[in-house]
Image: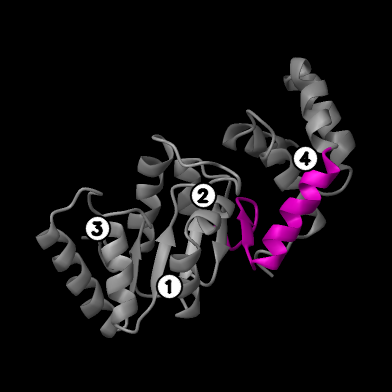
Amino acid sequence: MAGLLTLEVKNFLKLATAKGVGFKFLTRFYSEYKTFGGDFEENLKGFLKKHFPKRVEEIQTHLKREEFFKKLFTFLEKNGVKVIPFFVQEYPKKLLEWEIPAIYLIGELPERGFSIVGTRKASEEGKKKAREFAKALAQNGFTVISGGASGIDLQAHWGALEGGGKTGIVAGEGIYRFLKNNPALAGKVLKNGGFILSQFSPLTAGARWTFPKRNALIAYFGNYGTL
């Protein structure tokens, strides 16, 4: 079942949360060993010695952070976060083009998604129109998708909720950070049957590079259009 914290997914997360380990590292490891399970520690040791000899001690030290990983796995399980890495069937293969190692999802992805994006510094008129349009979309059975940021994004989410429909957030930060920073919005989105998704490791803080990067996902999941 997608998103379960199997041993293989836990090993993937341990490696994916190491500093400097990204898509290329993870996919290269997988292409050589075909799994993050099995003799993971021995495989990783051989992989590091072969390709990254200067990082052996650093990464192996990271993997020994037992308390950190215990808290991470507890958070994911407690909040119903599905971890969908690139090597499982449920992972959308299009995301490989954007070098996204995994997506972290609470809720279910929509069948009829419509995305609304815009500036944080929108005019009052712009905010009003975004809210009204989102409300109408929700009332017609679409899941309104946006980025959870201030301005147009928030108006889209609240408009959909006012319309009694579903809305989805593609966050520009790790899912732990988003839930911590936006508890009220997150709670209402999930209560109405929407979803929260992030392409970033759970503890990743929002930064200038993260918000533009997630825009491709907002558009991708808006399979019925993007405004």
Residue 92 seen in render: no
Tell whether 131 sits left or right of 83: left
Q: Position of residue 99 (x, y in %)?
A: 50, 40
Mark 4 vs mark 2, foreground winner is 2
Q: CA distance from mark 1 to mark 2?
A: 17 Å
Q: Nearer the viewer, mark 3 or mark 2?
A: 3
| Earlier sequence position, callout 3 versus callout 2 | 3
| Residue visible at 43% across and 66% down in the picture | 185
Query: What residue did someone put label 2 on?
Result: 199
> Residue type at mark 1?
Pro
Highlighted range, magenta: 65-91
Between the C-alphas of marks 3 and 2, the distance is 21 Å
Asked if disc 1 and disc 4 are in contact, CB closer than 8 Å, the reply is: no
**In which quarter of the view is residue 221 placed?**
bottom left
Give the Cα distance between marks 1 and 3: 21 Å
**Is residue 39 visible in the rendered structure shown here?**
yes
Q: Mark 3–mark 2 contact, CB under 8 Å?
A: no
Q: Residues within 10 Å of mark 3 (few under 14, many from 20)?
A: many
Q: Check disc 4 and report its element: helix, strand or loop.
A: helix
- Disc 1 crowd rating (10 Å Cα; few below 14, some 14-19, many 20+) is many
Please give the residue where the numbered disc 4 appears in the rendered image: 33
Q: Quadrant of the N terminus?
A: bottom right
Disc with the residue nearer the chain's start (1 vs 4): 4
Q: Which mark is residue 152?
A: 3
Count of picture labels:
4
**Residue type at the position of mark 2:** Gln
